[in-house]
Amino acid sequence: MNVNLYLLSSLVESLGAGFLLCFVLLTLGSPIIYAGWKNRERFRNISSIPRELENASVGDQVAISGNVDKSSKRTDSPFQSKNCQLAMWDICRLKRRGTLGTGFVWSQEAIGIRSHQMIIETSDGNVRVDNLSCKKVLGSSEKVKRSLMADSTTKFSSIEIELDDEGFEKKVEPVKEAPVQYSRFTDKLAFERPRRDSYGLIGRVLTKLRTPSDTTRYREAVFQSGDEISVIGKKTRNGLSFESSESMNPLISSKHISKIEQKYRRAYLFQLYFIPVFCVLFSAVMTYGSYA
């Protein structure tokens, strides 16, 4: 009898520890799981959007893939001064993570798109895309929304993804002068770059080991004639307008729509399903091991 009670007590303790471990793991993985839920939502929205203007009504969301036509109006990118049809850019500041200052993170300070008018050459003919140009210096509440993947500035939702894949970036430490062209551009934005007169002895040593705090990073991605491009926006009488709907943010990408779909599908399958299943199975194995 005492042996049975002991085994029962041991089983209850092991199960309790297993449930607690599973809860902790799921809590730690909740940001990844939430990102998976958002990626599944994006995948479903993109999958349901028509791929041809003829299959949509005016005001409906449409996904177009093709190549930048040479008839598109040209502009100059803000940082590289590249003559192009479209430039996406952002400005970030390296700051300490959290109130305790544990680690560093790039905080997006300003973001935008520069373009006059885009013409996309598709298999069904040329499509004109309007309302692409936009720029914004982000406030504190908008930075929080972006970190939580709940950004309300919908026109900017796809820029960061494209910039992460682009090779160009320029970092300027707070004790150094930014290139004149950069300063002129940020002055028009009313963005003030963090500055510092000099580093102390410890600061000079640390700068040799890592990027110093308050460093400003400038990034941009450009599209030229012939480049592959995909755009999601609202159908208009003249073509496409870079605007959001109730369920879908507008999007610009150098990837074909089908590849974007696959990317979000792989992401949500891993984040939303694999991570929770792994947490449960790992907890179950640890529970069995402690009981056995």
Image (tube, rainbow, N blue to C red):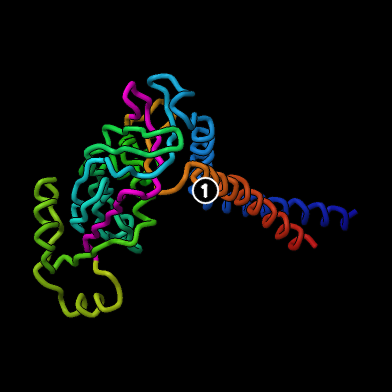
Question: Of 61 and 44, which appears nearest the observer?
Answer: 61
Q: Which residue: 12% across, 63% down?
A: 179
| 139 on left or right of 246 | left
Position of residue 205 measured from the top left corner of the image (x, y, whole percent): 23, 80
Residue lying at the far right of the rendered structure = 1
| Residue 79, image x, y percentages | 19, 56
Residue 69, placed above or below residue 279: above
Q: Image quarter for residue 194? A: bottom left
The magenta span reads 213-240
Q: Is residue 240 left or right of residue 134?
A: right
Find residue 170 and report its horizontal and vertical position in percent. Answer: 24, 63
Mark 1 is surrounded, within 10 Å at the Cα level, by few (under 14), some (14 to 19) or many (20 or more) other residues, namely few
- Left or right, 259 with reference to 226: right
When the figure is inspected, residue 128 is found, relative to residue 272, above or below; the finding is: above
Among the 4 quarters of the image, the one containing residue 132: top left
Q: Quadrant of the C terminus?
A: bottom right
Q: Secondary structure at mark 1?
A: helix
In the image shown, does 167 or 236 lie closer to the viewer? 236
Which of the 4 quarters of the picture holds residue 248?
top left
44 above or below 174? Answer: above
Q: Residue at x 56, y 44 (%)?
A: 265
Report the residue marked by disc 1.
263
Taken as a whole, is the magenta stretch helix, strand or loop? strand
Q: Please state which amino acid type lies under the numbered disc 1.
A: Lys
